[in-house]
Amino acid sequence: MSPVHVRAEPGDFAENVLLPGDPLRAKYVAENFFEGARQVTGERGMLGFTGTYKGKPVSVQTTGMGCPSASIVTEELIQLGARNLLRVGTCGGYDPDLRLGDLIVATSATAQDGTVSSITQGVSYAPAAHFDIVHAAYHAAENAGRRTSVGPIVSSDLFYDPTEKPAELWANLGVLAVEMEAAAIFTLAAMRGVRAGCLLTVSDTIGAEVVRISDEELRNAVDNMMALALDTLNALN
Ligand SMILES: O=P(O)(O)O[C@H]1O[C@H](CO)[C@@H](O)[C@H]1O
Ligand SMILES: O=c1cc[nH]c(=O)[nH]1
């Protein structure tokens, strides 16, 4: 039976799935990186596509913004047969060494959100990326010569964070950057026995002030990240 939100049937999705937040980025990836792409779902505008990349089946599915939306999509993709989930998104850089357009391979995602604490019923928990994906992503980035940082991120419920100096707090704790979905994806993947990871492009640097990347620079950096993400999935056993 088709799940409630990701309206599709078993077999419509490949085992390897890219997870951007943005539906138009999902469409862009399918149109520009996949061979033989077909749309497999579109409920609520949460577009999903399946095709092949260098001969291997692959899908891309929108998660929407925030852990509540990402958790629904993750659960339903796993019901539909997804086994390797790689989030591909943008983030705000907290680490002062990060530059706009840099790539991050997340190793863990602090759950500064309501979804993961609801799942764990308030028990402390450290959502982590699967080592196989971290390993494959790091090597894909290294081979491509891309400026890359590997380390912890934080998944927040907030894009507009009213906290005074959030960068100071998180950078002091060794956290590289903030985004909004990885903690829920990592947690559900671990619970369901599948692999998850996360690649991020730094779209904002957050320090004394917030600096945003230009649209063109972002497009180029995200294109490069998508190729690395697809090579990462193809390298998995
Ligand atoms: O670029 P995407 O994948 O949408 O990810 C980031 O961008 C959105 C906020 O602008 C949030 O979804 C955040 O996680
Ligand atoms: O979640 C996000 C994504 C991009 N930039 C941010 O500051 N936060």
Image (spheres, grey):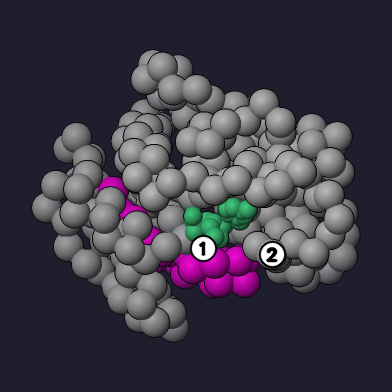
What residue is at 75 percent from the left and 55 percent from the top? 111
Q: Earlier in the sequence, mark 2 or mark 1?
A: 1
What residue is at 34 percent from the left and 57 percent from the top? 25
Name the quadrant where ligand 2 sits: bottom right
For the residues labelled 2 and 1, the Cα–Cα distance comes to 25 Å
Give residue 220's mark: none
Q: Nearer the viewer, residue 112 or 94?
A: 94
How many numbered markers are drawn? 2
Disc 1: which residue: 74
Give residue 160's mark: 2
Front label number (2 vs 1): 2
Mark 1 element type = helix
Examine the rendered structure and indicate whether residue 79 appears above or below residue 170.
below
Q: Hey, what amino acid is under mark 1? A: Thr
Q: Nearer the viewer, residue 210 or 73?
A: 210
Q: Is residue 191 left or right of residue 174?
A: left
Asked if one can make out residue 215 in the rendered structure from this viewpoint, the answer is yes
Specify the quadrant that holds the N terminus. Answer: bottom left
Q: What range of the chain is rendered magenta?
A: 58-80
Within the magenta stretch, is there residue 65?
A: yes
Q: Is residue 40 left or right of residue 65?
A: left
Specify the quadrant that holds the C terminus. Answer: top left
- Circles 2 and 1: CB distance less than 8 Å? no
Q: Nearer the viewer, residue 169 or 206?
A: 206
